[in-house]
Amino acid sequence: MNQNETGRISTDIKLGFGKQLGFSMGEMGGQFFFAFWGSYLSVFYTDIVGLAPFVVSIIFMAARVWDAINDPIMGNIADRHRHKKYGRYRPWILFGAPVLGIVSILVWHVPNASSTELKIIYCTVTYILAGMLYTLVNVPYMSLQSTLTTNNKSRGDLANLKGAFTFVGSAAMNLFTMTLITKLGGGEANAKGYFLTGVVFTIVGLILFFITFATTKEVYFAEPQETKATFKELVSYIFGNRAVLAIMFSLLCSMLCTFGRLGVAVYYYMYCCQAYAIVGVLMVVPTACAIIPTYVVPKIPIARKPLIIIAFIGRAAALFALYLIDFTNITAIIVCLVFVGVFNYETGMLSGLIAPAIDDCEVRKGIRLDGTIYAMVNLFAKLATAVGGSVGLAIMGAMGYVANAEQTSRALTGINIATNILPAIFCAAGVIPILFYNLNNEKMEENSRILAERHAVSENSQQ
């Protein structure tokens, strides 16, 4: 931490690109766990393990019901503890990531049991455990960004780069997944290929998380929450903040569109487009095309709200166009996927507005629960994966999808609806909550100044 001219400790630090990049490596690392599960776990469960789509959707939803209890608790635990050497949130990355890695590998190693019931139990237990451990690492990671500085510009730049690396990680993962699965599976997509790919991605993800731990330092510590907040207090804290609610529900819609589509898109490319050889390329096009806009668009000197609304509307339109295109017109499909990616910059912008909303709540109420808010964001991301994917799988199942078989025209329509129309609806719905966001740049700067002064006084008095 730096000291200003008065001798007070300053948290208004401008983070250089190197430190921003180090922090963003954790976001990229998370994609080798979370995005891999979201994109390929459903097809692994249905086409490799042999579970029915309806059963898989039930497993996903059961995990999310537990997450609704587990994630806020984890956020509150992180808020109440501070390691003397490593800070409040970094220790969870250091000690939690290896355990996450072990369970993540187990997710892709389903025993070849003769009983379907045993397979269902194994998949349910390992998936729920993996989700809990992902929360244990990712909630502190997300909370970490608001402790690195109180400088609003650096916070914004940090959020933009983090958002871009969401897509860098997802694009890298999707680009190599099918190739790795096939090669490591001895020339075919089998259980061995999925398992070994899971091992490779786990190692990559752990390395990236450790880079984040090694290159970050917490400098802003709000007053610790000494007692566990009650459920009523947590609800009041979250639902009493209009700006937080607007961001969270817009993020939910955005992630329902993104992750819900990722969970079923592989079926669309394999069965509708019959483009198995280029599944990896088609999966990576929208994520790759989102990288630059996510980092560049927030720098445009225009109010964030209209930019976010434009993104929602543009992506919904591109998805609707994708639904109408003939399955054999791969060129037109790729063009639409480009626009789906280009208009997917709002997720990073929305994430960048979370810390200022938490600041506003601390200024007004004297309470700061970063971990709790980011736990809810993490919960919403997992809900988006489960709900979007589960509803999509349910639609596919209801319209006649049969794993590893030639699909009827009705089943193909079901896959198309699940992959394109459903995400378009989610995306369009995201416009509504962001209309209620009520913080402008002037208010953010004022809050940042107030909190920096409070913190400087508090730290100085402890010396």
Image (cartoon, grey):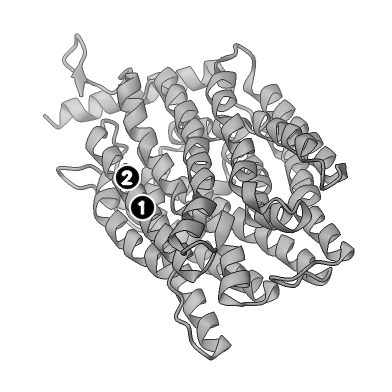
The amino acid marked with disc number 2 is Phe
Residue 122 image offset from top left, x and y in percent: 47, 79
Residue at 47 percent of width and 24 percent of height? 156
Q: Quadrant of residue 340?
A: top right
Residue placed at 35% from the left, 60% from the top? 100
Q: Residue at x 72, y 40 (%)?
A: 430
Question: Which of labels 1 and 2 is toward the front?
Answer: 2
Determine which residue is flagged by label 2. Answer: 209
Whether residues under marks 1 and 2 lie with C-beta atoms below 8 angstroms apart, the answer is yes
Q: Is residue 113 above or below residue 378?
A: below
In the image, residue 429 lies at what x, y percent? 76, 43
| Other residues around mark 1 within 10 Å, as few (<14) / some (14–19) / many (≥20) | many
Q: Amino acid at mark 1?
A: Val
Above-or-below relation of 197 to 26: below
Q: Is residue 146 visible?
A: no
Q: Nearer the viewer, residue 374 or 40?
A: 40
Instruction: Identify the image quadrant of the N terminus.
Output: top left
Q: Give residue 279's position: percent from left, percent from top.
A: 63, 49
Task: State the residue at coordinates (54%, 68%).
Answer: 63
Does 342 appear above or below 273? above
Rendered-image quadrant of the C terminus = top left
Q: Which residue in the protein does label 1 denote?
A: 137
Left or right: where does residue 60 sit relative to residue 81?
A: right
Res. 191 in view:
yes
Element under label 2?
A: helix
Q: Nearer the viewer, residue 398 or 114?
A: 114
